[in-house]
Image: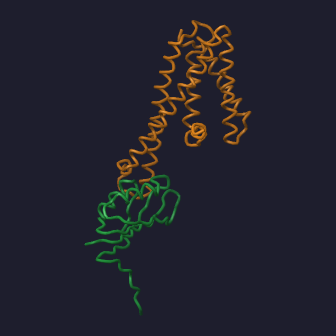
Chain colours: A green, B orange
């Protein structure tokens, strides 16, 4: 499967790692061409991140391992787009 | 300029201040008896005391920093609902906190040496006026307290007096114990 986009729910502790460290870890993975790390919910000790990664032949296992090695935690995969091109979700019309 | 900025950075303050104060107090408790003239000071003794301070300060600060940072990782792992509370220590963060602890211990150790050498060198320089060596050291502690009080927006006078009283008490104890006799 040629994964072109991954949308991940990632959590990290407030103090560390920094977003730059997580970004560095993701960038070093094969196939990553672009990414977006957006701050989500923040509570007393942790912060949630929405991580969008685009590229060609993305390897989820490698990316998840890199994120976890940086000290953050992947809580779930919220979107996978794969194939010859990126296809956006089509809204159901009722 | 960069050194001044580095010295003023809040994240280095604990190691610098604690190292300096620890070094000065170490020197006073161990060598106050020698400073006031019982046996006198030698450069070799100054070197030995500086080495002792470097080792003890470095070791104490490494253990303190590392245990604090490791407990922070455990707390973070709990907050992130990780099954293993030691998990974060096996990631890049484990190495990061180890390096931070070593760096903090090195800084504290260097400033500990500086702090311990100051009273001893002053004692050597004014060997003919033994009490002057102790007095100048206590005044230096006061200046350190004054600058700390200003930097934390507290009362500089109170900080200066606090450190000077502590210095006098430790020096008096050092003279009384005369450890190196």
Residue A88 pos. (x, y %) = 38, 80
Q: Residue furthest front?
A: B1
Horizontal side, residue B72 vs residue A6: left or right: right
Nearer to me, B82 or B20: B20
Q: Residue at x 31, y 69 (%)?
A: A56
The quarter of the picture where the N terminus of chain A appears is bottom left
Nearer to me, B5 or B141: B5
Q: Residue at x 37, y 66 (%)?
A: A33
Does residue B54 sit above or below A61 in this rendering? above
Residue B9 pos. (x, y %) = 58, 42
Residue B65 pos. (x, y %) = 47, 39
Q: Residue furthest bottom?
A: A94
Horizontal side, residue B15 vs residue A69: left or right: right
The quarter of the picture where the C terminus of chain A appears is bottom left
Does residue A81 sit above or below B117 in this rendering? below
Does residue A63 sit above or below B4 in this rendering? below
Q: Residue at x 59, y 7 (%)?
A: B38
Q: Residue furthest left?
A: A1
Q: How many marks?
A: 0
Does residue B70 sit above or below A47 in this rendering? above
Residue B154 pos. (x, y %) = 70, 40
Nearer to me, B98 or B176: B98
Dividing the picture into quadrants, the one containing residue A31 is bottom left
């Amino acid at each position: 499967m040629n994964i072109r986009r991954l949308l991940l729910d990632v959590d990290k502790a407030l103090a560390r790692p920094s977003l730059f460290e997580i970004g560095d870890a993701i960038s070093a993975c094969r196939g990553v061409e672009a990414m977006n790390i957006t701050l989500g919910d923040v509570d007393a000790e942790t912060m949630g991140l929405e991580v969008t990664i685009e590229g060609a032949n993305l390897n989820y296992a490698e990316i998840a391992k890199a994120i976890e090695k940086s000290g953050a935690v992947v809580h779930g995969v919220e979107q996978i787009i794969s194939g010859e091109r990126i296809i956006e979700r089509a809204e159901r019309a009722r | 300029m960069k050194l001044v900025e580095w010295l003023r950075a809040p994240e280095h303050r604990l190691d610098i201040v604690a190292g300096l104060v620890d070094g000065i107090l170490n020197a006073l408790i161990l060598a106050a008896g020698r400073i006031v003239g019982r046996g006198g000071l030698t450069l070799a003794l100054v070197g030995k005391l500086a080495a002792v301070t470097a080792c003890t300060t470095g070791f104490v600060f490494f253990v303190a920093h590392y245990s604090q940072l490791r407990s922070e990782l455990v707390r973070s792992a709990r907050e992130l609902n990780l099954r293993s509370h030691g998990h974060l220590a096996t990631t890049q963060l484990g190495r990061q906190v180890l390096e931070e602890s070593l760096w903090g211990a090195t800084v504290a150790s260097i400033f500990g040496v500086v702090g311990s050498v100051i009273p001893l060198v002053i004692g050597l320089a004014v060997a003919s006026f033994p009490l002057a060596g102790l007095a100048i050291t206590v005044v230096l502690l006061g200046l350190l307290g004054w600058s700390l009080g200003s930097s934390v927006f507290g009362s500089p006078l109170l900080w200066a007096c606090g450190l000077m009283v502590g210095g006098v008490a430790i020096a008096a104890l050092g003279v009384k114990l005369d450890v190196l006799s």
